[in-house]
Image (cartoon, rainbow, N blue to C red):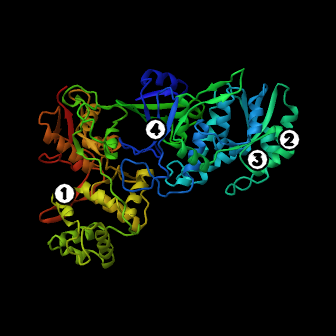
């Protein structure tokens, strides 16, 4: 992983990206601990010079559909294109709706422009667009009312930073676009925060904390702009910038038409323009000199603005991928992060030597290729340092599964589900009647019926053969993939991924109980540290690379509870799945430099009851860090490195 300053990004691009190669840019809307975060295509650059750009966005917001390779939301929402219009305007890919007569007058202005911006102008990318096309001849005024309005958004909107609805993501993107102009303006641009007495006047007009901004606040901003216009130096021109029509009319009455510019990004116009011409020429012509001049945005500018909409982006050429994320000192960043932004860049080499170039690649193939462990690929010497082309998977990435239409409140009780499945395969289980209520049995029956595991009479369903194969193989990952098609189950795991919550209603909690029974969810420790989802795909290379990092030198040892913590944090594996991974590794490679030791004692840790399926039925076995065997005789207490 490399950490570089935003101001050095152009230099990094010049040194790393081949000049004439096409570059595909993908983006994801939520940060995860997965080594293969889901993303959507945004655009493709004709070259790193960014002379042309082809927009690849889906026509509407992708919704959750069980796909592991596509970033998605919980709803379609109505602001998908409105949000991207703001981003593309800030990046100069599209032009906003603007008063062209007044704009031409401003472009020909020889004095320095001082924009007094309301919140709308900052959020919709218009202010950023104007700073670019006026090329350093601009300063910006901001006010206490704008700052206060923006700072309230994250506090008033639960789930703001891990936005799962399109509307919340839209608000978060607008917030970031505005903050980046205020906190990190382009070189040569001065952001003037109004003096304390003016700020106090603006704050006095704010309503209660939960009610937002007073409608009189914009009028006060106009009155302040009137005073600034009257007192401004002769070599400067003040322009009140807004995308609110009513505000623009009021400002025109107070300041005069020459001192007001109406401009706003428009979602419908952006969608129509890109549909008609998805391949767009970047740049802006300015009437300077006898022939004018063309300004072209740098690639770093595109990346930084895309990161307003996305929590990470992926740059991909034919042979290499880079994942770029903003570097934050804490979850949402500190003032230093805003004032002097840094980026974390993870590099991966994509080997195609083992692939047939004529073979088409699907979405799952692309997801597999985005394999990044702690930011870098395995580089250790030995058997596992071979070229990464076709991977040898321990836990395969899940394929695409379509969500089923089922009520999110249905409870997949483990005992009811496995008892009914066992009965459908001809087994007899007296525990169903003795331990499961009729209500839980009915809900489990409906779930299995909707998945095709059983029929209406409780016998073999249309997909019973698939369920029987997974049962006899004790393939809990397969069952987990099937349950992820249930809205309630998928939503419960999304909540855990977001904040590790332990607070669920009894109905939602049954989904977590099922995930624990399948070995997919566990706890870090007893108490309030919460849950984590450990269902990530892992290859042999991934595990080797992780063990190399954890045990770098001969003689190094780690207890199994320490190893489980690291496997959870870096590989996203629960103790149950980490045990399977190590067992698989030792079964494949008899001469690994890592061996298990049984002496000593370790912290047992929280215990999960994980189901064990087989030809004689099923039972629940306790699984905890201190009880793992990794296929050995008796519990393994430590793992040691025995060779280089």
Cβ–Cβ below 8 Å for labels 3 and 2? no
Residue 474 is labelled as: 1
Q: Tell me which corner region of the image, top left, top right, bottom left or bottom right, holds residue 454.
A: bottom left
Q: Position of residue 87 (x, y in %)?
A: 58, 41
Residue 161 relative to residue 16: left or right: right
Identify the element where label 1 is drawn: loop
Identify the element where label 2 is drawn: loop
Residue 265 relative to residue 357: left or right: right
Residue 541 relative to residue 82: left or right: left
Q: CA distance from mark 1 to mark 3?
A: 63 Å
Residue toward you, 598 or 62: 62
Q: Residue at x 16, y 70 (%)?
A: 425
Q: Position of residue 547 (x, y in %)?
A: 25, 35
Residue 526 relative to residue 557: left or right: right
Q: CA distance from mark 2 to mark 4?
A: 43 Å
Q: CA distance from mark 3 to mark 2?
A: 26 Å
Q: What is the quadrant of the N terminus in the image?
A: top left
Q: Residue at x 15, y 60 (%)?
A: 472
Q: What is the quadrant of the C terminus in the image?
A: top left
Say whether residue 195 is visible.
Answer: no
N-terminal of the pair, mark 2 or mark 1, is 2
Q: Nearer the viewer, mark 2 or mark 1?
A: 2
Residue 256 is labelled as: 2
* Residue farthest toward the right in the current orientation of the protein: 230
Question: Which residue position holds label 4?
Answer: 313
Q: Nearer the viewer, mark 4 or mark 3?
A: 4
Question: Which residue position holds label 3?
Answer: 203
Answer few, some or many: residues within 10 Å of disc 4's Cα (few below 14, many 20 plus, some between 14 and 19).
many
Q: How many marks?
A: 4
């Amino acid at each position: 992983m490399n950490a570089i300053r935003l101001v050095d990004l152009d230099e990094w691009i010049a040194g790393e990206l081949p000049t004439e190669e096409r570059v595909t840019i993908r983006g994801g809307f939520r940060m995860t601990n997965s080594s293969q975060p889901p993303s959507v295509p945004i655009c493709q650059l004709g070259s790193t010079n960014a002379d042309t750009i082809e927009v690849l966005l889906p026509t509407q917001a992708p919704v959750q559909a069980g796909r592991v390779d596509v970033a998605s939301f919980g709803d379609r929402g109505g602001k998908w294109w409105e949000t991207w219009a703001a981003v593309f305007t800030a990046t100069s890919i599209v032009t906003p709706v603007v008063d062209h007569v007044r704009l031409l007058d401003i472009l020909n202005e020889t004095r320095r422009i001082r924009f007094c911006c309301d919140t709308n102008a900052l959020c919709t990318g218009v202010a950023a667009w104007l700073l670019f096309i006026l090329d350093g001849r601009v300063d910006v005024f901001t006010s206490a009312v704008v700052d206060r309005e923006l700072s309230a958004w994250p506090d008033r909107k639960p789930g703001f930073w891990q936005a799962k609805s399109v509307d919340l993501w839209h608000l978060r993107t607008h917030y970031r676009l505005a903050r980046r102009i205020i906190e990190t303006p382009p070189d040569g641009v001065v952001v003037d925060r109004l003096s304390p007495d003016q700020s106090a006047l603006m704050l006095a007009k704010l309503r209660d904390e939960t009610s937002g901004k007073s409608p009189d606040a914009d009028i006060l901003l106009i009155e302040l702009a009137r005073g600034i216009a009257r007192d401004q130096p002769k070599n400067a021109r003040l322009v009140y910038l807004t995308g609110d029509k009513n505000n623009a009319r009021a400002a025109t009455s107070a300041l005069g038409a020459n001192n007001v510019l109406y401009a706003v990004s428009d979602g419908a116009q952006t969608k129509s323009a890109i549909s008609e011409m998805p391949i767009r020429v970047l740049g802006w012509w300015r009437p300077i000199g006898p022939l004018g001049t063309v300004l072209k945005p740098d690639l770093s500018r595109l990346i930084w603005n895309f990161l307003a909409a996305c929590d990470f982006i992926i740059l991909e050429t034919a042979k290499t991928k880079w994942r770029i994320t903003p570097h934050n000192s804490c979850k949402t960043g500190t003032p230093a992060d805003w004032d002097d932004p840094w980026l974390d860049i993870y590099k991966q080499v994509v080997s195609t030597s083992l692939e047939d170039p004529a073979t088409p690649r699907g979405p799952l193939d692309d997801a597999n290729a985005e394999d990044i462990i702690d930011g870098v690929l395995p580089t250790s010497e030995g058997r596992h340092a071979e070229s990464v082309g076709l991977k040898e998977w321990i836990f395969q990435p899940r394929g695409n599964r379509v969500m089923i239409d089922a009520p999110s409140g249905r409870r997949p009780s483990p005992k009811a589900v496995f008892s009914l499945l066992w009965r459908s395969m001809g087994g007899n289980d007296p525990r169903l009647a003795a331990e499961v209520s009729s209500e839980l049995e009915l809900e489990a029956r409906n779930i299995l019926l909707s998945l095709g595991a059983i029929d209406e009479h409780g016998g073999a369903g249309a997909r019973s053969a698939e369920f029987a194969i997974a049962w006899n193989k004790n393939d809990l990952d397969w069952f987990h993939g099937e349950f992820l098609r249930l809205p309630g189950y998928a939503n419960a795991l999304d909540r855990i991924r977001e904040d590790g919550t332990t607070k669920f209603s009894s109905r939602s909690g049954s989904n977590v109980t099922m995930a624990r029974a399948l070995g997919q969810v566990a706890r870090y420790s007893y108490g309030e540290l919460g849950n984590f989802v450990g269902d990530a795909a892992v290859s042999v290379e991934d595990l080797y690379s992780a063990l190399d990092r954890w045990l770098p030198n001969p003689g190094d040892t780690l207890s199994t509870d320490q190893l489980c913590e690291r496997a959870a944090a870096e590989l996203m594996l629960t103790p149950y799945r980490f045990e399977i991974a190590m067992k698989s590794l030792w079964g494949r490679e008899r001469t690994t430099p890592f061996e298990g030791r049984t002496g000593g004692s370790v912290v047992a840790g929280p215990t999960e009851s994980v189901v064990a399926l087989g030809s004689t039925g099923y039972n629940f076995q306790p699984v905890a860090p201190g009880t793992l065997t990794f296929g050995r005789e008796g519990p393994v207490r430590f793992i040691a490195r025995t060779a280089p």
